[in-house]
Amino acid sequence: MTTGYPTAGPVGTHGPALGSVPFLARRPQGAAGPAALPTMAPAEPAPTMVRADLDPTVRAVRAEVATRMQSDRTGQGLDEPSRQEAGRALIEAVVRDHNDGLRAKGSQPLTATAEAYVRQAVFDAIFRLGPFQSLVDMVLQRPSGERVGVTDIEIYGHNLVLMIFADGTKRWFSDLFASDEEMVEFLQLLGSRDPNREQAFTPARPFLEMTLPGRLRLAAVGFAPTAVPRVTIRLQHLKHVDLAMLRAQDEIDTVIESFLTAAVRARKSIIVSGQGQGSGKTTFLRGLASAIPATESVCTVEDVYELYLHEDRARHHRVTALQAFAGAGETDAAGRTTGQILTPELLRRALRHNIGRIIVGEVRDPHELLAMFESMQMGNGSMSTVHADRARDVVERLVGLAVRDASVGENYAYRQIASTVDLIVYLGMEEGPDGSRTRYVREIIEPTRGEGGQPVAITDVFIPGHNGRAIPHVAPSFLPDLVGFDPHLMSGTGTWRAR
């Protein structure tokens, strides 16, 4: 395989031991690579150096295990825990055979430490996330004793990693792979691992986006579009999110909680927005979805799973989760990729399954936006997220996305926003000097049909108070629809009612 990246060492797969305290390897002092990075060692033992000397052994054992699994159909028909147990037994057998072969040649067999390293490296490569696993498992021990997990991982080439923890803390580490080429090789392995959604990662298809076990979302770019391969991994730690939890975290107050709960139950269509990554849009959307009655039939349509309502059966009994697929095949004469399934098609198919409410995840492309409009036209209370700098900017952001489709004009986009979107919730975020993040609702607006040449009129339902947090301002036009919400709360006191 030729990636176009310089090879810094043998291509192989290695990683820290599964079940051990997470660590990342650092480059030895004086070796080539980036200058010293600001790092914070994980809470427990010091990092262990990458065993580059064992890379050839890891590759050989991994290849033999893969061959035997295929020929013996190891693990087929078993559930995942049983399949992994069978895989561990097979890895043990191959490592024993490898050592026996070394002894037969008069060579020194692997030490117990080296054996453990090889076994785990092969297991991680085949069944888990290989070198990425140590990143996903990493936690920081705070002085208070709290253990803080990772939420975002940014990887810049084989030897530069930024870890972002749940409290906003950022730490740099280095030397995850031996080379950029090895990093690309492992990404290709990940892309091919799922037979139902196999994705090629090649110079012709240099982008990779996929959902991984453990509520992980991975996005990668390699080859010609980038100087070094780049990977972003996002982790969804919270299995259950509701509006009460968001209130407890001071992201909303009691008035907003009551207002949004009533709006969701009244089937109002809501867009959640915020500036950039990390503003908490997806988590907030999950909180809104918690207000949907448990017996209601719901469909989520996403390009990569992030909402996970289908895994929360206690709160959502009837969920159909659909995921778009970019396809893994060649492009035909009409420009369609073999196996490609886009959001509009998923939406059309969903309507055949007695769906009451459709939630289109993040809107970033014209086809996702048009699918969102279509789902909101049903009047059943759809929800979506979109990036924007302010609440009002959401309108222009949506129009800008729409007109990227040559068949859609501005007038159509404005009409759809005015007639189908009931509320836009805008999230604010402040970042402290230590990297910690504070998130909260900053604005809630209602777009309606404009007059006098204005395509869309805006009602400021909640506006920023003195501290930036949203407080009631003007009642929305649909206030009578909000069963269970006290309309007198809209008169407000100009303060954030946290409790």
Image (cartoon, rainbow, N blue to C red):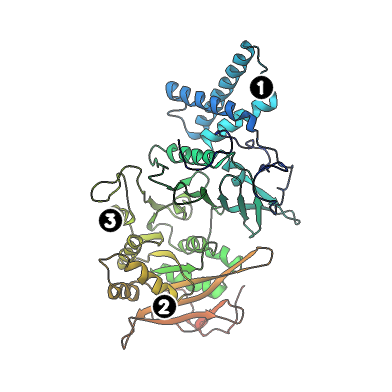
- Point out the residue furthest to the left here: 333
Q: What secondary structure is found at the residue carrying circle 1?
A: loop
Of the two numbered discs 3 and 1 on the same chain, state the one appearing first in sequence: 1
Number of marks present in the image shown? 3
Q: Nearer the viewer, mark 3 or mark 1?
A: 1
- Kindly identify the residue that appears in the image at 46 percent across and 23 percent down: 67
Q: Mark 2 falls on what kind of element?
A: strand
Structural distance between the alpha carbons of marks 3 and 1: 57 Å
Q: Mark 3 sits on what residue?
A: 348
How packed mark 3 is, by other alpha carbons closer than 10 Å (few <14, some 14-19, many 20 or more), is few
Residue 417 at x, y = what percent? 34, 73
Indicate the quadrant containing the N terminus: top left, top right, bottom left or bottom right.
Answer: top left
Contact check, label 1 and label 2, Cβ < 8 Å: no
Q: Is residue 433 above or below residue 348?
A: below
Residue of label 1: 110
Q: Which residue lies furthest to the right in this view?
A: 143
Question: Residue at the location (65% across, 15% down)?
Answer: 107
> Where residue 446 is drawn, which disc sits there?
2
Tell me, yes or no, if residue 268 can be seen here: no
Locate the C terminus and report the quarter of the image it occupies. Answer: bottom right
Q: What residue type is labelled 1?
A: Leu
**Marks 3,1: beta carbons within 8 A:** no
